[in-house]
Image (cartoon, rainbow, N blue to C red):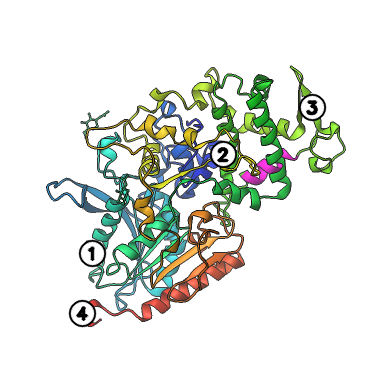
Amino acid sequence: MKLVHSVLQGLLLGLLAEATISLDRFRVLGPQGVNLWKLEKAYAAARSTLNPKFVVQDGSSSESVLSEDVAGFKAQWFRQPVDHFDKNSDATFRQRYWINMRHYNPDNGGPVIVLDGGETSGANRLSFLDTGIVDILARHTGGVGVVLEHRYYGQSIPVVNFTTDNLRWLNNDQSAADSANFMANVKFKGIEEDLTAPNTPWIYYGGSYAGARAAHMRVLYPDLVYGAIASSAVTHAAIINWEYMEIIRNAADPVCSRHLENSIKTIDSILSSGRLKQPLKALFGLSDLRHDDDFASVIESPLGSWQSKCWHPDFASTTFDDFCAALDKPPFGSGLTSLSELPYGAPERMLTLPGGLAVDFTIVNYANYIKKNVVSLCPEGVSTDLCFGSWDEEQYQVYDIGQEWRLWLFQVCTEWGYFMTSPPDPDHPRIISKLLTLGYESKICHMAFPPGKHFTVPTMPNVTVVNQLGDFDIAADRLALIDGEVDPWRPATPHSDYAYDREDTVLRPFKVIPGGVHHFDEWGLPNLADEPLEIQAIHGEMIYFVKEWLKDWKPPQTA
Ligand SMILES: *[C@@H]1O[C@H](CO)[C@@H](O)[C@H](O)[C@H]1NC(C)=O
Ligand SMILES: *[C@@H]1O[C@H](CO)[C@@H](O)[C@H](O)[C@H]1NC(C)=O
């Protein structure tokens, strides 16, 4: 079992809520190990939500169930150097991948559609190989589909433990070099033809962090990567990512956002005055949680479930909507159907608690929700400070390879950032506490990764490493950029409001999925006609532009 850690960060923040709150559905097994390709929901949990001290390795990991045998996909292995750039080192490791040959037409000689597994076990991505975007594109092009696991994740682990020193080969340059080496040299079992790049056209797909990688691959290795599709691609790395919650605040049901804004305003003022702070924490079942910022962090956790919204019935999450419905529930016997029928602060909505604390009923609802869905994860007899506190350095000093939460966190701390803070302007409306500052959110970097002999985590992540590759403006022929209108990660993509607008062309597709959240195009149904209309539409466009790209392909010797 896993406990919620108060520090939320990482691409999959959303997962926190999903992976921890819905423990039963998404059995949290490891940072990534949630019900696998039941997907990204896992990560967040993984990354930030656990208190490593309590991580119990559970042999029934969903990975062992799925990795070898999803729809007949068998794991294959490719040998990679641990360090692509140190010619004095000959250490290697095995990188795992899976291939889908169902649609392969040898007369075509490709293409190869490769999906970058990103920051989780590749086994979590097998649904995309089976019925998702990889299968869809392979089917329409007579190509081969591949899921390539990212180094350090799943079973592609080049080291014996995850100390700071041993994580030093977990970075963008090494991961991109893995993919390039794979494309140029892989020999697929069961396929006679040489399908390596550049002799065969490769289309590189990624979503989220891996989406940024897809865009970067097209720019860094243009001769190997014939085309790339970057979905919800976070090509803009940023130390502070307050915009994440701003998307949610604006996109959520306005009644829910208002409840959250009002609750947070009250909670912040109670916490900062100090008076009645104790009865407030007690209301949430967190009376022994010592630090106010940890309290703020625990009550933030349901918001991550916005990201878990998904159109695909097998992966859909109702957590966010359930949370909103819970906040709005009127007091029993009040005759109201929605709390919002009375103005915030109306006497009929107020409840006076022991100690004289009078709070709006939404806060009571909020407290009940947190008690029932989050605090309940803390085992009986263990203090909530031990479960949800983040200030004890010792809890992070665990380095075995079961500590998958260390992986994306290391990438955050070195190159990506994205610390989820409240808005920098204290007067800006907000749905999370102002105690969630950069200092609070980033302190884990130095607590979890003490300096090693060979590597030291920088004071703040060096986001230039990412942004110098193009940032919001990244562009290339045959690089498609696809985003979701209400994806909380959109502010870090080329569809950010900070980015310039561009034309959508076949050569440079630039598309938004209306009402879409996080990489909605990545899931698919066996029959496209069963998909929601906006998903059918994006899949149709993707099939079209990939086929158009392939019409222009010429092998290098005749180019
Ligand atoms: C981690 O592994 C290295 C070898 O790569 C070893 O020297 C070191 O003692 C290990 N550290 C811990 C804390 O396990
Ligand atoms: C950050 O990364 C960039 C790009 O690799 C590099 O030029 C720069 O020196 C780095 N900055 C620091 C402070 O290390």
Whether residues under marks 2 and 4 lie with C-beta atoms below 8 angstroms apart, the answer is: no
Report which quarter residue 202 is drawn in. bottom left
User: What is the spatial separation of the Cα atoms under label 2 and label 1, in whole angstroms?
Assistant: 42 Å
**Residue bearing the label numbered 3:** 351
Question: Which residue is at a point 36% across and 51% down the rendered structure image?
Answer: 464
* Residue assigned mark 2: 22
Residue 71 visible:
no
Q: Nearer the viewer, residue 129 or 86?
A: 86
Q: Is residue 92 left or right of residue 303?
A: left
Residue type of the residue flagged with mark 1 = Ala
Q: Quadrant of residue 342 in the image?
A: top right
Question: How many other residues sit within 10 Å of disc 3, few (<14), some (14-19) or many (≥20)?
Answer: some
Using residue 74 as the reference point, say whether residue 242 is left or right of it: right
The magenta stretch is 320-328
Disc 4 vs disc 3: Cβ atoms closer than 8 Å? no
- Look at discs 2 and 4 and give the one toward the viewer: 4
What kind of residue is marked 3?
Leu
For the point 26% across and 45% down, the residue is 169
| Comes first in the chain, label 4 or label 3 | 3
The span from disc 2 to disc 3 (Cα, nearest Å) is 29 Å
Q: CA distance from mark 2 to mark 4?
A: 54 Å
